[in-house]
Amino acid sequence: MATINDNYLKLKAGYLFPEIARRVNTFVEGNPEAKIIKLGIGDVTEPLPEACRTAMIKAVEDMGDRSTFKGYGPEQGYGWLREKIAAQDFQARGCDIDASEIFVSDGAKCDTGNILDIFGKNNKIAVTDPVYPVYVDTNVMAGHTGETNDKGEYNGLVYLPISADNNFIADIPREKVDLIYLCFPNNPTGATATKAYLKAWVDYAKANDSIIFFDAAYEAFITDDSLPHSIYEIEGAKDCAIEFRSFSKNAGFTGTRCAFTVVPKQLTAKASDGSEVELWKLWNRRQSTKFNGVSYVVQRGAEAVYSEAGKAQIKALVDFYLENAQIICDKLTSAGFEVYGGVNAPYIWLKTPHNLSSWDFFDKLLQTTNVVGTPGSGFGAAGEGYFRISAFNSRENVEEAMKRITEQFKA
Ligand SMILES: *Cc1c(COP(=O)(O)O)cnc(C)c1O
C-alpha cells in the first residue's frame, strides 16, 4: 500500500478558522435571528481598485486577439511588473534591489511555505509566539518538528514569546538559530518594527549566518515615516534576508492572487559539503520547475497598482481600513479594554477582560454581541488571554460592532 507523509498527522486537528466557523454555526442554529458581524478572518471586504480592474479588462481583450495573446509567461513574472516593483517598492526607498531578484507568485502564503523546499532538514527554526500559523504548519509538514507538548508547541521549534511585557517585540535569542520568521506590521498583534529593532536582527543574522524570512504583507499600512517598509532598508539585510510581499492586503487581491518574493543574488547558505550556494539560483530553479507563473491578466492588474491612479486608489483603500482600525481602538479603549496594534496595521490585539481565556471571551462576545473575532490562543500558546479584531470590514459593520461591544462591556 502507498504510504503518506506522516508529518501531516502531527498537525493539530482543530485548525483555528474551522473551529471558529463551527462555533459560529452552532450559535446561529440556536439563534437564527442573530445578526452576526465577522471581525475575525483577515480577508479584505472592499472591491478591487478601478485601476486594477481596468487593466485586467484590457488584458482579457489582449488574450482575445492573436497578435497580443499570451501563452506561458516567464515563471518569475513578466519583466514589466518586476521592473516596477523593483523601482517603486525598493529603489525609491533606497534599497538596492534589482528586478531579477523579484519572483512574482500567486501568494505570499504559498511562498512562505514553499521557501522551505530550498533549505535543509537540520536547520534550527525560530518563530514568534503568537505567530501566523502558516510558518509553523509548513515546517511541521516538511518534517522539521517533533510532536506537540501539552501547550501545543512543537518540539524542535524555537518559540520567541511576544506579549505586552515586551511590547510585542521578540527579544533577540541568546541561542543560535538558522532560520527566523519575522512579520511586520504583524499579524496577529498589529505590532510594528523600528529600523533599530530590525538592525538588531540583521546584526544577529549576520553574526550567526542565519537567514531571516521577512513577511511584509502589511507594509502598505505603515503611515509613520520613521518605520521601515522593507527589511532591505537595513544595511546588510541583502546578506541575510528573504522578503515576502503581497497585493492581497494593499490592493484587495486576496481573491485575485498576486504576490512576490525577493531573493537577493548575494544571499547564500551552506550545502552539506560545506560550499556556499546562492539561494537565488535554487529559488529560481524551484519556481521554474514547480510553478508556471501568475496569469497575464492578473499581472497586468498588479502592474496597475504602480500607476498614478492605482497608487491613489490603493492609498484610499488602506486609509479606509486604517480609519476602521482607529474607530475600533478608540471605542474599545473607551469601553475599558487594554488595546494594542491598530496603528500602522489593520489588526487590533486586545487583552481579554477579567483574565478570560481567549476562547471563553470568543464565546462571550459571540453570545452577547454577535460579533466574531479571533482567539489569540489560536496563534500560539503565548496568545492565550488575547483576542484579535480585524479592521477589514465595512464602516457600517465596524460601527455597529463597536456600538454593541461598548454597550455590553461599558465600565
Ligand atoms: C494575508 C497574509 C499574507 C498574504 O497572503 P497571500 O497568499 O498573498 O494572500 C501573508 N502573510 C501574512 C502574515 C498574512 O496575514
Image (cartoon, helix red, strand yellow):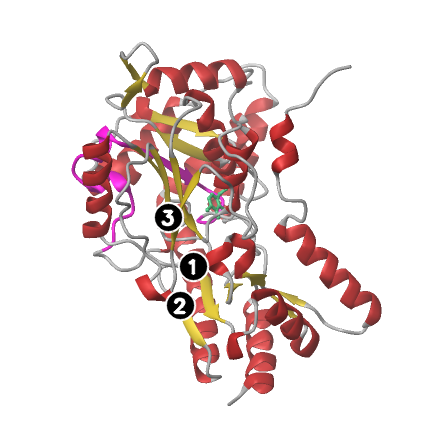
Sequence order check: which comes first, mark 2 or mark 3?
3
Q: Which residue is at a point 50% across and 34% down the rendered structure image?
A: 145
Q: Could you say which disc has been placed on residue 189 in the image?
A: 1
Q: Which residue is at a point 32% across and 28% down the rendered structure image?
A: 83
- The answer to whether one can see residue 312 in this image is no
The amino acid type, in three-letter code, at marker 1 is: Thr
The amino acid type, in three-letter code, at marker 2 is: Tyr
The amino acid type, in three-letter code, at marker 3 is: Lys
Q: Which residue is mark 2?
A: 340
Residue 231: where, in percent of width, then height?
27, 41
Residue 357: where, in percent of width, then height?
57, 68
The residue segment tinted magenta is: 227-250
Left or right of 85 in this view: 348: right
Q: Nearer the viewer, residue 157 or 292?
A: 157
Left or right of 335 in this view: 24: right
Q: CA distance from mark 2 to mark 3?
A: 28 Å
Say whether residue 229 is magenta.
Answer: yes
Q: Could you say which disc has been placed on residue 233 in the image?
A: none
Given the current orientation, which residue lies at the most extreme front position?
A: 150
User: Which label lies toward us, 2 or 3?
Assistant: 2
Picture quarter with the N terminus: top right
Q: CA distance from mark 1 to mark 3?
A: 26 Å
Q: Is mark 2 within 8 Å of ligand 1?
A: no
Q: Which residue is mark 3?
A: 311
Q: Secondary structure at mark 3?
A: helix
Residue 360: where, in percent of width, then height?
63, 70
Q: CA distance from mark 1 to mark 2?
A: 7 Å
Left or right of 297 in this view: 115: left
**Mark 3, other Cα within 10 Å: few <14 / some 14–19 / many ≥20:** some
Given the current orientation, which residue lies at the most extreme top position?
A: 273
Say whether residue 319 is magenta.
Answer: no
